[in-house]
Image (tube, rainbow, N blue to C red):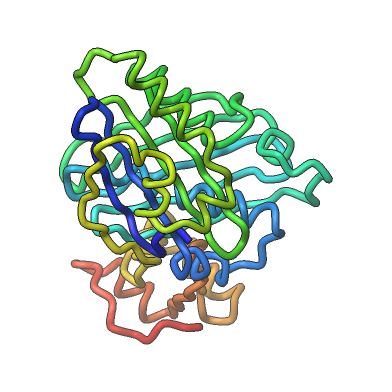
Amino acid sequence: MSTADTIQRFLFDDLDVRGVVAGLEQSYQEVLSRNAYPAAVQNLLGEMLAAVSLLSSTLKFEGRLLLQAQGDGSVRLLMAECNHQNELRAIARLNDELPEDTSLASLLGKGHLALTIEPANGQRYQGMVPLEGGSLASCLQDYFMQSEQLSTHIQLAADGQHAAGLMLQILPGVEEVKEDWHRVEMLAQTLTPEELLSLNNEELLYRLYHQETCRLFEAKAIRFHCDCSRERCAQALKFMTEQELNEMLLEQGGLIEVDCQFCNERYGFDTTDITALYAEGGHLGNQEQLH
């Protein structure tokens, strides 16, 4: 398959075009193991993970990149994110039973695709396009053309076991050379989903571009990781008043349980924790996570 659980950038030496290939296996399976998703949703999540991996290769700072598809269909939300350490996580939220047609448009209905960049230090940026492209890849291509006026070609594939993606772009700031770009993009379009999932990176690029001078950079490992923590859950609880939380404690038998939507870790807070949370400093003890 595309080299498993890696992101690898490449550059055409004689063309003003760059690219990146991403392959996911264990990281993809870690995401799917957290929730029981239907096959069609597993495939869409795989494409989301591959896409956010490709896009994260452009991050030049500490932070994270989030990709979110939201609509009014049976699948109301798909979300995937990747940080500067190439750590991935993703989630899907469903409204009801899925239709027989499992295309992106049928599953999500009318909605939008949002790309959000969150630097660890700096201003948050978000761009958005309607879900009108027919596929996640085409929606992302529309985003780059509309938001950044940057010619981009994206291919994504997933089969519930593996996920992979290929992205090509004109180098930013370079006037587009139509003939070169057309040739490179047309060759990419000959790649089948099966080839994208099965060929390793060198084989894939040789299959497409053996007549071009193509330079591969070092592959970077990607992995599943959820950065939830007891402290972050506690801070989320503080959006409620201490009185409201104490009332919840009474209703729930003396323990408030908070689940992480991404990884299903469970964190428990009792009366002592809530009191400490609203005390000066708001420091919580190192109570064990509940599973």
Give the quadrant of residue 2. Answer: bottom left
In this rendered view, identify the residue nearer to me: 43 or 164.
Answer: 164
Residue occupying image coordinates x 26% and y 58%: 219
Residue occupying image coordinates x 41% and y 17%: 146
Residue that sits furthest to the front in the current view: 211
Q: Is residue 54 above or below residue 245?
A: above
Q: As drawn, is 129 to the left or to the right of 181?
A: right
In this rendered view, identify the residue nearer to me: 254 or 201.
Answer: 201
Q: Is residue 274 above or below residue 132?
A: below
Q: As drawn, is 176 to the left or to the right of 81?
A: left
Residue occupying image coordinates x 78% and y 49%: 98
Q: As drawn, is 194 to the left or to the right of 87?
A: right
Residue that sits furthest to the bottom in the current view: 288
In this rendered view, identify the residue nearer to me: 143 or 202.
Answer: 202
Q: Position of residue 122 (x, y in %)?
A: 17, 38
Q: Position of residue 38 (x, y in %)?
A: 71, 59
Q: Position of residue 214 (x, y in %)?
A: 26, 41
Give the quadrant of residue 59. Answer: top left
Residue occupying image coordinates x 29% and y 25%: 170
Q: How many marks?
A: 0
Q: Position of residue 210 (x, y in %)?
A: 35, 41
